[in-house]
Amino acid sequence: MDKLIPPTDNLYKFLAIGSLIAALFCLTYPIYQNQRMAEFNVRVSIELAKSYSELMPLLKQRQAVEAEIQRFRQYGDKAALDRALEEQAIVQAHWEGNQSAIRELDILKDQTKPAMDIVTSYPGEWIALLCASVVISILSFLWWWWRFQRFQDMQLKAEATMAILRCNRLKAE
């Protein structure tokens, strides 16, 4: 009984093409991930800058409302004091919403640091994986050529030579 022989032709091609794909992944993924995280950080930084820029007018408005409340309490103007207290509640709600947005954006920005660190802090591993993939690909293509393609090329050459000889015999007759 014959031994079970694996389809090595397909195995070598699979190794060669699979390792080429791994090499392409090693080249593109860190760059893609780094660019994606940088773009995200820029967007978060822009949103943080907007939130901080909105904070200063709110602070001034809050201080002005508090000064009005003090003044209305001092003079005993009940209706104006009620309006000022309502305005203070609105300004306070805006202030707290803005503070909450800033906290959320800071948390988001802090969460992207580990994702960027994975890509940027392991360049040796990415390079090693890239080199291993390229070496495996080259060896797989060479093994495939040595084990299969070389013999197929010899068979094609022999068939072509036989065809030429037949044509020459036919011409000679």
Image (cartoon, grey):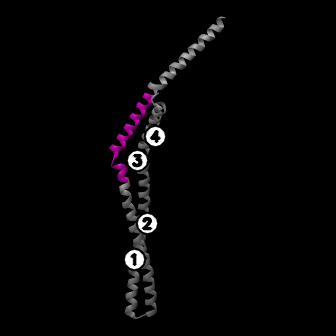
Mark before the other along the chain sequence, 4 or 1: 4
N-terminal-most mark, 3 or 1: 3
Spatial CA distance of label 2 from label 4 is 42 Å
Query: Which span of residues is magenta-colored?
Result: 116-143
> Contact, CB < 8 Å: mark 2 with mark 4?
no
The residue labelled by disc 3 is 30
Q: Nearer the viewer, residue 119 or 147?
A: 147
Residue 54 position in % (x across, y down): 43, 70
- Mark 2 = which residue? 50
Q: CA distance from mark 3 to mark 1?
A: 45 Å
* Amino acid type for the residue under numbered disc 4: Ile
Q: CA distance from mark 3 to mark 4?
A: 14 Å
Q: Is residue 52 visible?
A: no
What's the CA distance linking mark 3 and mark 2? 30 Å
Q: On screen, 66 above or below 107?
A: below
In-front residue for pair 37/124: 124
Q: Nearer the viewer, mark 3 or mark 4?
A: 4
Query: Is 164 located above or below residue 42 in the figure?
Result: above
Q: Is residue 131 magenta?
A: yes
Q: Which residue is mark 4?
A: 21
> Image point 44% across, 59% down: which residue?
43
Image quadrant where residue 49 sits = bottom left
